[in-house]
Amino acid sequence: MCGIIAYIGKHRAAPIIVEGLKRLEYRGYDSAGLAAQQNGRLVVIKKAGRVDRLAQEEAEHPLSATSGIGHTRWATHGAVTDANAHPHLSSDGKFALIHNGVIENYAQMKTFLLGKGFTFKSETDTEVLCNLIAYHYAKEDAAAGPSVRFLESVRKTLRHVEGTYGIAALCVEAPNEIVAARKASPLILGVGEAEYLIASDASALVGRTQNVVYLKDGEIVHLTPKAFTITTLDQADVSPVMDRITWSVADAELGTYEHFMEKEIFEQPLALENSMRGRFSEDGSTAQFGGLNLTAGDFAQVDRFMFCACGSAWHACLVAEHLIERFARLPVEVDYASEFRYRNSPLGRSTLFFVMSQSGETIDTLAALREAKRKGYRVLAINNSVGSTIARESDGGIFQHVGPEIGVASTKAFTSQLMIGAMVALYVARMRDMSFADGVQYVNALKGAPDLVRRVLAQAPHIRDIARRYAASSDFLFLGRLSLFPIALEGALKLKEISYIHAEGYPAAEMKHGPIALISEKCPSVVLAPKGELFNKIVSSIQELKARKGPIIAVTTEGSEIPAGLADAVISIPDCHEAVLPIVAAIPVQLLSYYIAVERGCDVDKPRNLAKSVTVE
């Protein structure tokens, strides 16, 4: 959700913080602010709205401090106002705090603090936390010195917290020091040349350093210009493990593209190649994965798969379900991660869990992982973030390796998830009854997917023209069958996310069981109609829509024979293997949604009310 950035070093902090906030804005963009020490007091600059407003304000009133904290907000507690923007000051003016997450017991804390004379200017749980730090600081022994008092007051405060947090704090009596901590909300320590940074996402760090330490739950880091220490809430020392970010700042920049979503759509051929690289056997008949931590014998004992995910990743899991059941002949269940831990689903002991999350920090998916592990199941993860919480807590997994995805609406991460799901289906199928020849054919199809995607991307001008024709519509239906039903769901989600058009995805045959009531001249239907055994049935569904004057946008494979005049617009995709078809079919619905949103003047990369990584329940 929200974005955190903190800096301490030899340079002026405010410009570095503002630049970091711009890179983090995709995580939340309701308001932004920063705090630093100036002339012996903590100065806070914060504004509702985008980071550019904050940057302008800071430029007019520059801060000279070489340490500071900054935040871009996705509202949880309290409306989008200047007062609710972060950072928050304690009522005595001694502490400034930024916070991601939700403090569930903030009301009790606030009642306690009001009784102690503390005052509040916002509706947020964060201001409560800041005042509680001030309360504990006042109780610490003054002889210990402000540096120790600062660290210990944060530690004692966090012991009282119920909920989630990623925080960074300043103390006016401990200048040029920062204390940061996390619980179920990501924080990364960046280690540069005579400088340190704290961020909620690596994208804010890569412009200054690629050397990082991924903080774990319950860890607190204390920063000075010359050193850092990491301890736990129980005061145990932690030896830091240094990692390295493998992508560069250029990967997180727009380049020649108008939007990050556009850039990431066109990066998909390369992203798919990176997801496959080194993951096929020497004989070219199956997939291989280095991080599953399971033997072939372990897989032979599996008699059921359970996938948990949210949003686009949930749609990718539905495709994986189809392919595993189709080719490996094993039952698969897909559940919303947000629902799984609150249900009491009866599962056999030979069930293997997969969780899927691009960020590796999705709170609902992380909770599902922990619930499955609590019940004794082995859990594997498919995610795109090395060092993420889900990557660390799973028993093994598969990294996507597609680089940073900045656009809020997932594109290249989604098709990478489709690819990895297809590879898992192959891997399991070859352990069971798929022949060598069929495995080779499957592998060759997967290897050819990037070129097929390039062929669809070449049709972008044609798809843009179609988008212009239907951009004024207020409703859309997306229809597909079998492995393309999840792509219909994904198409509807994309259109809703970035253009704010009401859209629904359905199995094509279900259209007549209710949704057909929506059909009119003003409600276009995007129908995924590939060649195959169900082609004629899908054409029949199109005819039912057309009989009710519904405009038809048909996405169909080359060489299919949709009757002349039945579709108002046709997008052709290459005829391909069943395992690759969902990947190829996803491209036109992404482009269509993107171009419709652009035509409507929407902020494609920062759609209203949304954030890239959902780290609060």
Image (cartoon, grey):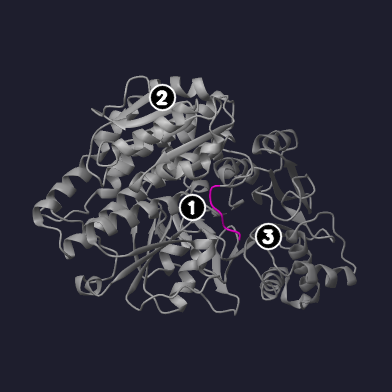
- Front position in the image: 186 or 322: 322
Decide if residue 403 is in sight here.
no
Q: Residue 235, percent across and down?
A: 59, 79
> CA–CA distance between discs 2 and 3?
49 Å
Mark 3 surroundings within 10 Å by alpha-carbon count, few (fewer than 14), some (14 through 19), many (20 or more): many
Residue 583 relative to residue 191: left or right: left
Q: Secondary structure at mark 1?
A: loop
Three-letter code for the amino acid on which mark 2 is drawn? Ile
Q: Amino acid at mark 3?
A: Ala
Q: Position of residue 538 (x, y in %)?
A: 35, 37
Position of the C terminus by quadrant:
bottom right
Residue at image mark 1 = 192
- The alpha-carbon separation of the residues under discs 2 and 1 comes to 45 Å
Q: Residue at x 73, y 69 (%)?
A: 146
Identify the secondary structure beneath mark 2. helix
What secondary structure do most residues of the magenta stretch adopt? loop
The nearer-to-camera label among 1 and 3 is 3
The answer to which of marks 1 and 3 sits earlier in the sequence is: 3
Q: Which mark is residue 169?
A: 3
Which residues fall within the magenta stretch? 612-617
The answer to whether 610 appears left or right of 373 in the picture is: right
Q: Position of residue 60 (x, y in %)?
A: 74, 33
Q: Is residue 530 magenta?
A: no
On whether residue 613 falls in the magenta region, the answer is yes
- Name the residue at 56% across, 43% down: 26
Q: Earlier in the sequence, mark 2 or mark 3?
A: 3
* Residue with the mark numbered 2: 463
Q: Are marks 2 and 3 in contact (CB under 8 Å)?
A: no
